[in-house]
Image: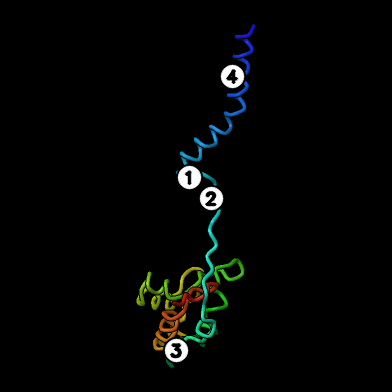
């Protein structure tokens, strides 16, 4: 009789502790000892530098104006603006020649501008895009 009670106590203890054992084993399998909470790191910015306008050349300013008139309405990366967001990373990844060809010839979703923009104007847009972060992102500053 005493042996049965001892077995029952052991079994009850195992049943009680099993969720803890399984949880720690699962955490160990994921490479984390405990649930983690991301650390919040405060960064102090010089706000005058952060909000100062980017210095643009005359070519880049003309490209910004052309981009605002001809491109920005579609290139937002949303359902209302289905074109992909454009900026410096896009130009670096695809290259000047590809962007120039795409703007000139267009695609199924985008009209071509080879007859409505001069090659120099397309170059101005590319020059501006090389200075611009993608739409919807803040420029990173040191």
Q: Are marks 3 and 4 in contact (CB under 8 Å)?
A: no
Frontmost residue, 117 versus 80:
80
Q: Which residue shows up at 46% across the image and 81% down it?
A: 113
What label sits on residue 32 in the rendered view? 1
First in sequence: mark 3 or mark 4?
A: 4
The reply to whether the C-beta atoms of the residues labelled 4 and 2 are less than 8 Å apart is: no
Pointer 4 or 1: first along the chain: 4
**Residue at left 49%, top 73%?**
134
**Front label number (4 vs 2):** 4
Instruction: Report how far apart the C-alphas of labels 4 and 1 lie in the structure.
Output: 29 Å
Q: Quadrant of residue 31?
A: top left
Query: Regarding mark 1 in the picture, which secondary structure is present there?
Result: loop
x 61%, y 25%: residue = 15
Mark 1 and 3 residues: CB-CB less than 8 Å, in contact? no
Residue under label 4: 10
Residue positioned 60% across, 14% down in the render = 6
Q: How many numbered marks have been drawn onto this rendered protein structure?
A: 4
State the residue position of label 2. Answer: 36
**Mark with earlier residue (2, 3):** 2
Q: Secondary structure at mark 4?
A: helix
Label 1: how many Cα within 10 Å (few below 14, some 14–19, many 20+)? few
Q: CA distance from mark 2 to mark 3?
A: 44 Å
Q: CA distance from mark 1 to mark 2?
A: 8 Å
> In 3D space, how far apart are the residues under numbered discs 4 and 2 (Cα atoms)?
33 Å
Residue 2 as seen in the image, left or right of residue 32: right
């Amino acid at each position: 009789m005493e042996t049965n009670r001892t077995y029952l106590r052991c079994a009850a203890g195992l049943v009680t502790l099993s969720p803890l054992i399984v949880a720690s084993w699962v955490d160990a399998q994921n490479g984390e000892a405990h649930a983690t909470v991301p650390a919040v790191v405060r960064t102090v910015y010089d706000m005058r530098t952060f909000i100062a306008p980017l210095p643009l050349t005359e070519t880049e300013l003309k490209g910004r104006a052309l981009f605002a008139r001809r491109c920005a309405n579609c290139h937002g990366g949303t359902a209302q603006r289905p074109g992909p967001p454009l900026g410096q990373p896009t130009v670096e990844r695809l290259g000047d020649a590809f962007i120039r060809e795409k703007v000139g010839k267009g695609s199924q979703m985008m009209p071509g501008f080879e007859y409505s923009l001069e090659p120099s104007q397309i170059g101005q847009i590319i020059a501006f895009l090389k200075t611009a972060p993608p739409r919807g992102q803040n420029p990173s500053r040191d």
